[in-house]
Image (tube, rainbow, N blue to C red):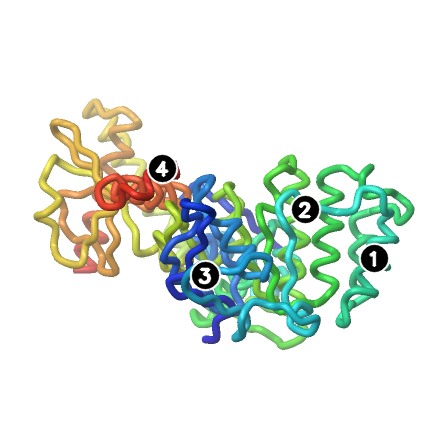
C-alpha cells in the first residue's frame, strides 16, 4: 500500500499528482501486480482531498491499463512499469554522469546545468508535440 | 449535468450599495465548489440569497431546480453553516442533536452519533465551552445529519488553527465520499480550496470573474516569461489575464486551450493561488476603467 501526498504549490492539478505518484511507485517497484491502492474513502480521510479527484486519478490509471477496479472491494494493480525500463536505467545513468562531468569541466555550476537540462527537455518535448 | 445553483443577473442592494451585481452563475451538481474573493466581494450575500435568508433586489436565483427554499420539505434538501459556525452556547452537544432530530424530517441520528463519537465530543458539554474546532465539527455534524442534497458553508475554517482546519476538511470530504452531496463553500484559504474543491468561482467587485472545473482551469492557464514584447502580437486564442514588463522581460499569464509553441517563451504551470490573485487583480483594474459607480466599495 502506498500513501499519497499533495503539493498545493506546484500548479499541477491534484488528480495528476496522484497519477504521477502511482506511476512513480510502479516504476520503482514499490507497487506490484496484485497490490491494492488505498480506497477513495481512505485517501479522502487521510489527506483531506476531494473524492472526485481520487476517482478521476484511478479512472485515468485504469484507462492506461495499470490498475483495475473490483466493485465493492477496491482498486488493484494489474501491470507494473518496473521491468524493461529499469534495465536501461544503468547505461543511461552512466551516459548522464559522463555528460555531467563534461558540463562541470566546461565550468557550469549546478544552476546552469539545471537550466540547460530543463530548457533542452522542454524544447525536445515541444518538438514531439509539434 | 444538472445544476444545484443557477443565478441570472442576480443582484442585491443595501441602500445605494450593490453587494452583488449582475451575477450569472451555474454550479453543476456533484462538485465541491469553492467560492473565493476579497472581503466585500459578495460571497456571504450570494450564500444568504441561496438559502433564502435574503431576497434578491434584481435577477433570479434557483436552488436545486426551484426558488430558494422556504417550506420545511425544501429546507430539508439544503444544509447551511453560516460564518463563524454558530451554535447555541448554553445548550449541550446532546441538546443540539435532539434539536436537530426534532427540526429536521430527514434526520439521520446514527450518522450524527457516529460523527460526534469520531470527533470525541462530550455529549454533556455545553457548546459555549467547546474549542473552535469542536464547535465547527458540531455545526458540520448538524448540517450533514439532516442529509441534504446541497451543503452551503460560509467560511467554515476561517477561525480554525491549521490542525482543526485539516480535521474539519477531512470530515467534510468523508461526508462527500459517503453521501455524494454537492458542496458550495467560501474561503480565503486558496490552498485549502485547491485540496477539496473541484470547481472554482472567483467573485470580485460583486461579479463573477472566473468559474470552472479546477483541473481545466489549471491546465488552460500558463505563465509565459521571455524577452520583452507587445502581448498584442500573441497568436489568437491566447487570452492575456495579467501582464507585467521590465525593460527586457515580459511575464504574462495567459489562458489558452492549445499548447504554447513559441520557443521564445518559457512556459510554466500556474498554481491556483496565483490564478485567483490574477483574476482578482484584473477585476480591480477593469472596475477602475469601466465601473466608477462600484469604486466606493473598495
Between disc 2 and disc 4, whose residue precedes?
Answer: 2
Dot 2 corresponds to which residue? B85
Identify the residue at image location x=55%, y=57%.
Answer: B54
Can residue B46 be seen at all in this image of the molecule? yes
Spatial CA span between label 4 and label 3: 59 Å
Could you tell me residue B170's position as x and y percent?
65, 51
Output the chain of dot 2. B
**Residue pictured at 27% horizontal, 41% vertical:** B292
Residue drawn 55% across and 47% down? A5
Circle 4 sits on which residue?
B296
Residue beneath disc 3: A81
First in residue order: circle 1 vs circle 2: 2
Task: Kindly report the distance in space between the C-alpha atoms of the residues bearing marks 3 and 1.
Answer: 51 Å
> Pointer 3: residues within 10 angstroms few (<14), some, or many (20+)?
some
Which residue is label 1 attached to?
B97
Question: At numbered mark 2, what does the secondary structure look like: helix, strand or loop?
Answer: loop
Q: Position of residue B118 (x, y in %)?
A: 80, 52
Distance CA(mark 1)–CA(mark 2): 15 Å
Amino acid at each position: 500500500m502506498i500513501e499519497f501526498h499533495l503539493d498545493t504549490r506546484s500548479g499541477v492539478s491534484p488528480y495528476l499528482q496522484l497519477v504521477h505518484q502511482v506511476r512513480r511507485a510502479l516504476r520503482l517497484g514499490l507497487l506490484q501486480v496484485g497490490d491494492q491502492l488505498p480506497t477513495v474513502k481512505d485517501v479522502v480521510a487521510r489527506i483531506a482531498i476531494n473524492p472526485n479527484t481520487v476517482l478521476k486519478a484511478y479512472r485515468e490509471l485504469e484507462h492506461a491499463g495499470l490498475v483495475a477496479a473490483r466493485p465493492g472491494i477496491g482498486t488493484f494493480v494489474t501491470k507494473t512499469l518496473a521491468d524493461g525500463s529499469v534495465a536501461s536505467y544503468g547505461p543511461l545513468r552512466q551516459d548522464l554522469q559522463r555528460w555531467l562531468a563534461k558540463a562541470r569541466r566546461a565550468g557550469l555550476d549546478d544552476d546552469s546545468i539545471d537550466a540547460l537540462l530543463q530548457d533542452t527537455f522542454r524544447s525536445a518535448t515541444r518538438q514531439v508535440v509539434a | 449535468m444538472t445544476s444545484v445553483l443557477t443565478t441570472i443577473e442576480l443582484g442585491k442592494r443595501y441602500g445605494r450599495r450593490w453587494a452583488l451585481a449582475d451575477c450569472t452563475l451555474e454550479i453543476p451538481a456533484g462538485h465541491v465548489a469553492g467560492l473565493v474573493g476579497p472581503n466585500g466581494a459578495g460571497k456571504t450575500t450570494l450564500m444568504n440569497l441561496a438559502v433564502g435568508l435574503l431576497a434578491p433586489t434584481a435577477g433570479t436565483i434557483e436552488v436545486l431546480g426551484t426558488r430558494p427554499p422556504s417550506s420545511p420539505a425544501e429546507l430539508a434538501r439544503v444544509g447551511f453553516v453560516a460564518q463563524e459556525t454558530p451554535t447555541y452556547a448554553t445548550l449541550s452537544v446532546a441538546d443540539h442533536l435532539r434539536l436537530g432530530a426534532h427540526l429536521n424530517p430527514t434526520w439521520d441520528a446514527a450518522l450524527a452519533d457516529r460523527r460526534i463519537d469520531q470527533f470525541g465530543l462530550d455529549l454533556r458539554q455545553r457548546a459555549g465551552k467547546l474549542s473552535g474546532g469542536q464547535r465547527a465539527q458540531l455545526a458540520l455534524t448538524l448540517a450533514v445529519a439532516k442529509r441534504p442534497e446541497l451543503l452551503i458553508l460560509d467560511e467554515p475554517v476561517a477561525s480554525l488553527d491549521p490542525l482543526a482546519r485539516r480535521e474539519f476538511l477531512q470530515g467534510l470530504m468523508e461526508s462527500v465520499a459517503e453521501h455524494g452531496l454537492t458542496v458550495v463553500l467560501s474561503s480565503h484559504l486558496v490552498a485549502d480550496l485547491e485540496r477539496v474543491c473541484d470547481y472554482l468561482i472567483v467573485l470580485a467587485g460583486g461579479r463573477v470573474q472566473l468559474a470552472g472545473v479546477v483541473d481545466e482551469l489549471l491546465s488552460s492557464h500558463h505563465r509565459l516569461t521571455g524577452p520583452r514584447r507587445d502581448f498584442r502580437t500573441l497568436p489568437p486564442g491566447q487570452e492575456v489575464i495579467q501582464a507585467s514588463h521590465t525593460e527586457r522581460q515580459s511575464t504574462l499569464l495567459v489562458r489558452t486551450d492549445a499548447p504554447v509553441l513559441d520557443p521564445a517563451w518559457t512556459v510554466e504551470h500556474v498554481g491556483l493561488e496565483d490564478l485567483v490573485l490574477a483574476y482578482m487583480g484584473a477585476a480591480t483594474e477593469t472596475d477602475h476603467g469601466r465601473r466608477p459607480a462600484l469604486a466606493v466599495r473598495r
